[in-house]
Image: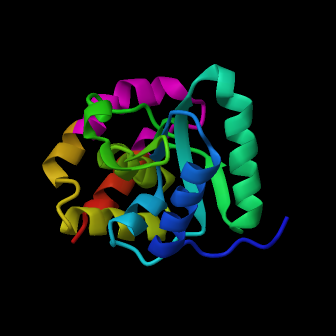
Amino acid sequence: MSPREEVTAERLRSLLESIGKEFRHPARLYLTGGEGLVWRGLRGSTMDVDIAYEVDPRHHDEWLLCLRGLKESERVSIEEAGPADFIPLPPGHESRASHIGRFGSVDVYLFDPYSVALAKIERGHARDFVAVRGMVAAGLVVAPELRRLFEAILPDYERGSLSADLARFRRNLEEALRP
């Protein structure tokens, strides 16, 4: 595998255009992590393009081959990862996804920003807190609603994993929302 390069907004657009050219069937692609912040201009670059997708099972193998090929030719790290891998998704997450365009027959969405913020808060790296503060400052998420959705997912969060640590998650929320 060739070395991966940082993904800027320009490189992300190029990747999406390449996906649209190479994959000839309808699909939904969700940008689920920091690349959404790059797309929105809230961050200059990211190392990985985190995605979730919906594709007809008849075309699933072709979809994966397309993405694998583009990982190599575009020198981009594409990962199947999203907020649902780390937290229970908050109520209404589907309606908060933003359609950013159609590339060929692939519709591309930015995943629900509240889900992205909560997943970053759960992970709890310093860079994640900076990202969440940027999302709040840009009005992408509103602190009271983020707190409400945090409380809404807690029952499922505690049941979700042996490693779930409610006290740490709550501390992380406060740290991320600190001015």
How many labels sit on residues? 0
Q: Residue at x 70, y 46 (%)?
A: 66
Image quarter where the C terminus lies is: bottom left
Horizontally, residue 125 falls left or right of residue 79, namely left
Residue 131 appears left or right of 146: right
Q: Of all residues shown, which one is farthest toward the right?
A: 1
Residue 3 location (% of width, % of height): 78, 73
Placement of the N terminus among the 4 image quadrants: bottom right
Q: Nearer the viewer, residue 155 or 81?
A: 81
From the viewer's perspective, tell me whether residue 60 is left or right of residue 108.
right
Q: Residue at x 74, y 32 (%)?
A: 61
- Front-most of residues 40 and 142: 40
Q: Quadrant of residue 171?
A: bottom left
Q: Is residue 8 visible?
A: no
Q: Taking 89 as reference, is 15 left or right?
A: right
Dominant secondary structure, magenta: helix
* Start-end of magenta stretch: 149-167
Query: Could you say where residue 23 lies in the image, as x and y percent from the top left?
Result: 62, 43
Residue lying furthest bottom:
44
Question: Compared with residue 59, is residue 47 higher up or lower down, i.e. above or below?
Answer: below
What residue do we see at 60% from left, 39% from top?
Answer: 24
Magenta-drawn stretch contains 162:
yes
Q: Does 174 sit above or below residue 52?
A: below
Pick whichever, 20 or 70, lies toward us. 20
In this picture the colour scheme is: rainbow
Check if residue 152 falls in the magenta segment: yes
Image point (60%, 62%), residue name? 48
Residue 18 visible = yes
Where's residue 26, x and y in %?
Answer: 51, 33
Residue 173's x, y, as percent?
Answer: 33, 53
